Amino acid sequence: MPTKSSSSLERSKEILTAEYEYIADTASQANEDRARVASFYLIAVGSLVAALFSTQLLNNNSNIKTLSLLFSGLFCVLTLLGTLTVTQLARLRAAWYESMMALNQIKEYAISQEKDIAKAFRWRAHSMPPLYKINSISYQQTLEVALLSGLTFGAAIYFLQIGINYNCSSCNWAYTIAAAVFAFVFQLNLYKRLLTVSKKEK
């Protein structure tokens, strides 16, 4: 008959196995959610731009100022959605990283109990990638979102100037480009800052 200690050991192994599988599923879910979030934003921007270029509203018989203000507002909303998407991407990256840390903690415990199994693990706590990594998929998705958000914010400023009848050819484009660059840099910095804060909390 199994002894009490062996029975307890079996239960511990079952708990560790269940915990490991749960954490692995959590990490996988974070990656899936990250792709879904980025795709949703890309589709939203693409749909609005397609509608903008296919509409017949912007013709000589339309109220250009009103429509321009309307489009400015819509592009502002898309920029805000872009900022929210960047925030979500940062949170999902942090969630994935937390899952990896938890998995490696279980690995390290297993290694402490049986040294030989260390050879089976290529990924260990000391080999984890940094939380903020510019050549990661998460960062590249953030780059896409930030670029589109920069374009939408630039478009919002451009249409706003038309809507308020601010006519200065050189100034119009200067403000538009400056707004686009500002939004792009702001969102990349926001992503980095959120991950930096998340790392400090850990």
Image (cartoon, rainbow, N blue to C red):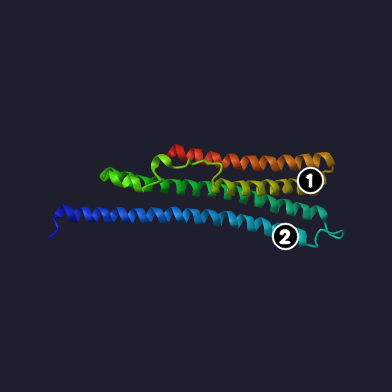
User: Which circle's residue, 1 or 2, is located before the other in the chain?
Assistant: 2
On-image quarter of the N terminus: bottom left
The residue type indicated by label 2 comes to Ala
1 or 2: mark nearer the eye? 2
Q: Residue at x 79, y 49 (%)?
A: 163
Whether residue 198 is visible here, answered yes or no, is yes
Secondary structure under tag 1 reads helix
Q: Are marks 1 and 2 in contact (CB under 8 Å)?
A: no
Q: Position of residue 82 (x, y in %)?
A: 62, 50
**63 or 22, which is in the foreground?**
22
Q: Is residue 202 left or right of residue 35?
A: left
Q: Position of residue 159 (x, y in %)?
A: 77, 49
Whether residue 168 is visible here, answered yes or no, is no
Label 1 neighbour load within 10 Å: few <14, some 14-19, many 20+: many
Q: Specify the farthest residue to the left.
A: 1
Q: Residue at x 84, y 59 (%)?
A: 59
**84 or 25, which is in the foreground?**
25
Secondary structure under tag 2 reads helix
Which residue position is annotated with label 1? 161
Q: Position of residue 7 (x, y in %)?
A: 18, 56
Residues under labels 1 and 2: Cα distance? Answer: 22 Å
Label 2 neighbour load within 10 Å: few <14, some 14-19, many 20+: few
- For residue 95, the mark is none
The number of numbered badges drawn on the structure is 2
Which residue position is annotated with label 2? 50
